[in-house]
Amino acid sequence: MKRITVLFPLLLAFACDDNDSDGCVKKILKENEMVRYTGQELGCSTHLKLYEFKNEQYFLFNNHCTDALYLPFDCDNTSICLEPESEACKNFEQAEYKGIVGITKS
């Protein structure tokens, strides 16, 4: 019985692990026809950077070969800095860079 008592909270934690944070990344990757970044050579591929602030996730496209200006967006795929004074844009400015999470399909 002790084993079940110890294992149940662990199973519950893993079951919820795919909830919001990873679910948001998967959603954004799918909507933008990208694949998860696993260390592939970036070259001139557009890639997706992840930022977090107060449990909110923000994304920013990047491409080392273009001079395109990309605006950050949220988990709803909505640009957040169209109005630089918006709360979401101010949050993005304080967000911590977490790394590259996606890359365009080859």
Image (cartoon, helix red, strand yellow):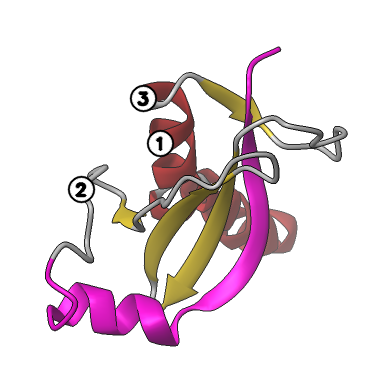
Q: Name the amino acid, label 1.
A: Ile
Magenta residues, start to end: 83-106
Q: Name the amino acid, label 3.
A: Glu
Question: In the picture shown, does residue 26 fall above or below 100?
Answer: above
Image coords of residue 82 (percent x, y): 16, 62
Name the foreground residue: 16 vs 8.
16
Residue 88 lies in the magenta-colored region: yes
Q: Circle 1: is it few (<14), some (14-19), or many (20+) Cα within 10 Å?
A: many
Q: Residue at x 47, y 71 (%)?
A: 52
Name the element at disc 2. loop
Contact (Cβ within 8 Å) of mark 3 with mark 1:
yes
Find disc 3 in the rendering and name its residue.
Answer: 31
Q: Residue at x 55, y 24 (%)?
A: 34
Question: In the picture shown, does residue 85 fall above or below 82?
Answer: below
Q: Name the amino acid, label 2.
A: Thr
Contact (Cβ within 8 Å) of mark 1 with mark 2:
no
Displayed quadrant of residue 28: top left
Circle number at residue 28: 1
Quadrant where the N terminus sits is bottom right
Residue 45 seen from this side: yes
Q: Label 3 vs label 1: CA separation?
A: 5 Å
Find disc 2 in the rendering and name its residue.
Answer: 78
Q: Label 1 vs label 2: CA separation?
A: 11 Å
* Outermost front residue: 67
Q: Label 3 vs label 2: CA separation?
A: 12 Å
